[in-house]
């Protein structure tokens, strides 16, 4: 005898990079298992893949392409999905560096917002005729970071992977048509001022934002700003 089907409620949330609303259902036990398996590995890549799979299962939009997600899309959308699937209220604890005491807080995930830090300039001019156009870091970028990549080379890897096109007054050169060595040589030839502008592109990306304000035992007003998933949850 067929068992009864359980209807799921549907909600809407923002897909930040595309500035549009998508419908979704809460995740269920099947998706919770995906998350638990990833947590057991303790690897960030496994958590990213698990969250991407859960979003793929739960977002009810035929135009939704998980491969097009940016890093901030994935974090924000999972936070909103978790709020509707489990509980919008979470308990967090942080140690105050001044008095060395642990303080407990409750956070309403429904109040977490996307912080737009002004216009993100992705067209960066190197001189009067040459420039580079950057693109948002994708989830695929996080998934494909080499395991043995030294920390000192991570920034260069990020920049190289997020170059969309390089152009001069005559030609546009898509980064996908260049080799890794060619892109590395190009980045290493940039002047410091241009490289700083590229770093600012990453610094000014949209991000989640939630602010906690409290007074510590010394009577000092303190602020904690939460901007990433790891600020809200401890994995593993």
Image (cartoon, rainbow, N blue to C red):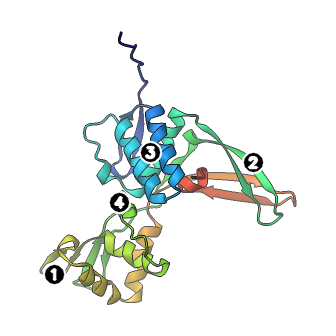
Q: Nearer the viewer, mark 1 or mark 3?
A: 3
Q: Compare residues 224 and 182 and report the one nearer the observer.
A: 182
Task: Label 3: state its secondary structure.
Answer: helix
- Looking at the picture, how far across and down is residue 108, in whole percent? 61, 40
Q: Which residue bears the numbered disc 3?
A: 77
Q: Which residue bears the numbered disc 1?
A: 169
Mark pair 2, 4: CA separation: 33 Å
* Disc 1 to disc 4: CB gap under 8 Å: no
Mark earlier in primary sequence (2, 4): 2
Mark earlier in primary sequence (1, 4): 4
Q: Which residue bears the numbered disc 4?
A: 138
Q: Compare residues 209 and 86 and report the one nearer the observer.
A: 86
Residue at (39% x, 71% y) in the render: 146
Mark earlier in primary sequence (1, 3): 3
Residue at (48% x, 50% y) in the render: 38
Q: Compare residues 55 and 18 and report the one nearer the observer.
A: 55
Q: Which residue bears the numbered disc 2?
A: 104
């Amino acid at each position: 005898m067929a068992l009864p089907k359980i209807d799921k409620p549907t909600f809407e949330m923002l897909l930040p990079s595309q500035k549009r609303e998508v419908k979704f259902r809460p995740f269920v036990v099947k998706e919770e298992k995906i998350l638990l398996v990833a947590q057991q590995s303790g690897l960030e890549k496994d958590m990213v893949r698990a969250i991407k799979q859960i979003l793929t299962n739960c977002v009810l939009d035929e135009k939704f392409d998980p491969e097009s997600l940016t890093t901030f899309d994935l974090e924000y959308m999972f936070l909103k999905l978790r709020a509707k699937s489990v509980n919008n209220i979470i308990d967090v604890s942080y140690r105050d560096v001044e008095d060395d005491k642990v303080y407990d807080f409750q956070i309403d995930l429904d109040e977490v917002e996307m912080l737009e830090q002004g216009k993100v300039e992705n067209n960066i001019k190197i001189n009067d005729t040459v420039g580079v156009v950057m693109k948002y870091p994708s989830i695929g970028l996080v998934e494909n970071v080499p395991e043995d990549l030294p920390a000192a080379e991570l920034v260069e890897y990020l920049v190289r992977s997020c170059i969309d096109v390089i152009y001069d007054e005559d030609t546009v050169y898509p980064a996908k048509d260049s080799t890794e060595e060619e892109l590395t040589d190009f980045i290493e030839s940039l002047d410091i001022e241009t490289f700083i502008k590229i770093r600012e592109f990453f610094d000014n990306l949209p991000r989640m934002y939630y602010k906690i304000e409290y007074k510590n035992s010394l009577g000092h007003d303190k602020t904690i700003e939460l901007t990433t998933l790891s600020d809200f949850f401890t994995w593993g």
